[in-house]
Structure formats: C-alpha cells, structure tokens
Amino acid sequence: MFVTGMTWMPIPFSILTGIIAELVYWSGGYKSMRSAVLAAGVFPLWSCGNYLPLFLQREQYFAGRTSYGQEYIDAVMKFTPNWMFFALLIATFVCGIIGGLLGKALLKKHFERAGIA
C-alpha cells in the first residue's frame, strides 16, 4: 500500500488487526468454528486503515487534493465526519462475520456431501 502512494498509517493498523484476528482464532485452539467466524470479522478491519489519514490528518489529506476542486473537498468533508470511521469499522466487522457464516455454511455443506462431516 505504501508503494502505491498511501501513507504509512495502514501498515501498523494492518499489523495490529492481523495480530488481533490471529489471537481470536488461537483462543479457539484453531478448531472452534465460533472463533474462526469471529476472526473472519476482525481480519478485514485492516482495510479501514486506508482511511485513517482522512480522519486523523484531515487538513493534510485535503491539502493534497486541491486539484479536485473545493466542491469535491466540501462534499467529502460533509460525508465523512469523525464518527464515520467507527461506522466503517462496525460495517466492515459485520460484513466479515456474514462472510464467515457463509463460509461455515458452505464448508459444512461440502463436507457433508463428501461424507467427511
């Protein structure tokens, strides 16, 4: 991400969320489906790190986008109040949980069909 022009902020955020997801999965002994689904909710949070500069360094972020025009900057600022980052985190977590549950259902279906479960 850093090589493609993003700031340094997503890197430690990604490492942190990856470690948390691993600890969640580890807490279930790598066998608990509940911890696997919960880890599937935590792991995608790394992608929210890309938006940290938008919320933590607003002035610097928009100073680099003056070529887009003031109308663009005003619109983005209007739709991204600081509380929006937490909404982004929650939405990402919920969608990750849904994905984990879908994965669990697909695995169960295919293992039953193969006679393994």
Image: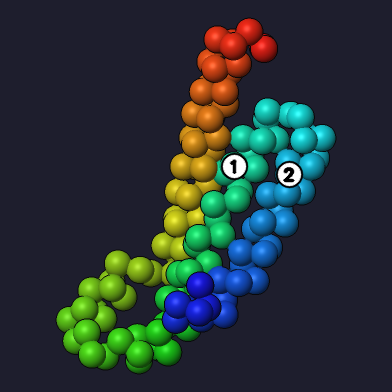
Q: Residue at x 68, y 63 (%)?
A: 16
In the depicted structure, whether residue 57 falls above or below residue 43: below
Mark 2 nearby-residue class (10 Å; few <14, some 14–19, many ≥20): many
Q: Residue at x 28, y 73 (%)?
A: 76
The amino acid type found where label 1 is placed reads Ala
In the depicted structure, whether residue 114 falls above or below residue 55: above
Kind of element beneath mark 1: helix
Q: Would residue 57 appear left or right of 65 to someone viewing this image? A: right
Location of residue 87 (image quadrant): bottom left
Quadrant in which the C terminus appears: top right
Residue 102 placement (x, y as % from top left): 49, 29
Residue 30 placement (x, y as % from top left): 77, 35
Tags 2 and 1 touching, CB below 8 Å: no
Q: Residue furthest front?
A: 114
In the depicted structure, whether residue 55 falls above or below residue 42: below
Which sits in the foreground, 92 or 81?
A: 92
Residue 18 visible to an observer of this rendering: yes
Q: Earlier in the sequence, mark 2 or mark 1?
A: 2
In the depicted structure, whether residue 105 falls above or below residue 116: below
**Which residue does the numbered mark 1 point to in the structure image?**
40
Q: Residue at x 51, y 42 (%)?
A: 96
Mark identifier at residue 24: 2
Which sits in the foreground, 38 or 86?
A: 38
Location of residue 40 (image quadrant): top right
Tally the numbered discs.
Answer: 2
Residue 85 placement (x, y as % from top left): 46, 63
Mark 1 nearby-residue class (10 Å; few <14, some 14–19, many ≥20): many
